[in-house]
Amino acid sequence: MFYLYCKQDRQRVRERQRDREPPKPCPQYLHGTSRSLPTKISLSPLSWRPSLHSRAIFPRCQKPRTLIVVATILKAKPTVLVAEKLGDAGIQLLKAFANVDCSYNLSPEELCTKISLCDALIVRSGTKVTREVFESSGGRVKVVGRAGVGIDNVDLPAATEQGCLLVNAPTANTIAAAEHGIALLTAMARNVAQADASVKAGKWQRNKYVGVSVVGKTLAVMGFGKVGSEVARRAMGLGMHVIAHDHYAPAGRARAIGVELVTFEEALLTADFICMHMPLTPATSKMFNDDAFSRMKRGARIVNVARGGVIDEEALLRALDSGIVAQAALDVFREEPPPKESKLVQHETVTVTPHLGASTTEASVYAWPSILASVLLLHHITISNFKLFLYILSIWIMMVQSELAPFVALTEKLGRLAVQLVAGGSGLKFVKVTYASARVNADFTAKKRGLNLTEERIVLDGSPENPLEFIQVQIANVESKFAGAISDSGEITVEGGVKDGKPHLTKVGSFGVCVSLEGSLILCRQIDQPGMIGRVGSILGEELHPGNKL
Ligand SMILES: O=C(O)[C@H](O)COP(=O)(O)O
């Protein structure tokens, strides 16, 4: 049996809105068979928005631009634990598909107990989904739906080990977070929160709360992804000069918005205002530390609506006390909620909010399609003829971004080539992958196979057009059946890049080459003498078409 919501629902949706009926799937679609599914329907990230059906429930959300279809083969209803408060309308919709247990503010122990009875878990950023949680589920929980962007509160390796998918809602909060960033920036510049508290305390201190203007000031956007770009657009509307720092941001997108991509150093040196919009990863953890503050333009102002962990909070306190940083506006903290006696929170020049970046009525609506999708995944969706783009972050991470697609192919081909160069029986123990950017989490699979995998990132300055300049794969402590593949440092080395959107091999051992990695590839070494290439071509031609002399 499947549920199908599509354009034809429009009339029923209107009727239901008018009659205020509770939302429910249209009966005429309840008993279809997979054969009655239309064949020419595609799902794209753009259409992955509130459907016409959900519009009935969320009448104020934007008009869907594209027909949206959700189809699934249904088995028994799964049990879904919703561990943090989300919009009621979405919960009602979820109840059409699942037994829903809304239990908020669970202690870690309570969560571990409940999880063993659930097939899916839905959380925001406040619930720590730890290894213990996954282990307590005994393999039952198959999907964790993160109703938001950040996934740093979920133990991704533990999820992967337990065969559990992690699905987030990467675009749901974009506008909400960007608007909150701008709200904090302007409120900070004009001492809104401090002045408000002062008036409410019966004071009238007009001289004390003289602010600074933002027009003509330089704003450095740290992390130029979806939220960073939206902040940049809005700040430009306020008359600010906007620069951005992000190793992975496509230069073309920045140019199109009118933003200059700069180095970290340049951002620190020149910015009057700095706002954070990067995820918390090992690379960004405490990116703003004593060293970074010491290189900052004196009197800079900082806004953080990303994650508390990107700033070393003790270092920020020192920078505020010494006047290097004039003001800070913080929506996020290393520990949430922060301790009551936190000197940072209580600091006169600091404006704080309790992680409200995504907290708008609209954002909670936009998160639901992804969450519902995560529950539908429990039913092993069978959608032939449908392209399903979901943000599935574990098992094999596939960020569906066309600019990265050739690099995924390149990585696979380089890996295959390197392994084929190993002489039989010499075993594979040490592999090193070098790249200038990384979005693929391969280490878990490598560990399972007993491989010692080292990754090296080479961070490039400037704004490369390519998201990655090159990827290099090295296999150490093995012999090769192709002596030329051994580099000067003694490892089998292959290197490649993407040219004109296609994966290319650029190095084998210490030989520079330029070979497209499409189709089959034969590596052979030859003595440089006339007629060799023709001879090899004839042998191959003879093998392909026996009897036909080329
Ligand atoms: O990562 C996010 O999406 C934001 O930080 C919001 O988190 P929240 O869902 O806990 O509000």
Image (cartoon, rainbow, N blue to C red):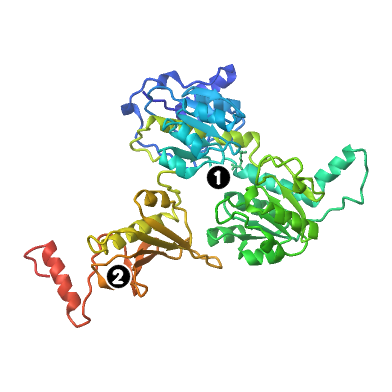
Secondary structure at numbered mark 1: loop
Q: Earlier in the sequence, mark 2 or mark 1?
A: 1
- Residue 94 x, y percent position in the rendering: 51, 26
Label 1: few (<14), some or many (≥20) within 10 Å? some
Q: Circle 1 sits on which residue?
A: 152
Query: Going by the image, does 546 lie left or right of 483?
Result: left
146 and 445: which is toward the camera: 445
- Residue 72 x, y percent position in the rendering: 39, 29
Query: Going by the image, does 284 lie left or right of 160?
Result: right
Mark seen at residue 257: none
Query: Going by the image, does 299 lie left or right of 510?
Result: right
- The answer to whether residue 70 is seen in the rendering is no
Query: Going by the image, does 343 lie left or right of 532?
Result: right
| Quarter of the image where ligand 1 sits | top right
477 and 10: which is toward the camera: 477
Q: Is mark 1 within 8 Å of ligand 1?
A: no
282 over 50 or under it: above or below: below
Q: Circle 2 sits on which residue?
A: 485
- Contact between marks 2 and 1 (CB within 8 A): the answer is no
Secondary structure at numbered mark 2: helix
Quadrant including the C terminus:
bottom left
Residue at 13% from the left image edge and 62% from the top image edge: 544
Instruction: Report the amino acid beneath label 2.
Output: Ala
- Residue 520 x, y percent position in the rendering: 25, 61
Q: Is mark 2 within 8 Å of ligand 1?
A: no
Instruction: Report the amino acid beneath label 1.
Output: Asp
- Residue 487 x, y percent position in the rendering: 34, 72
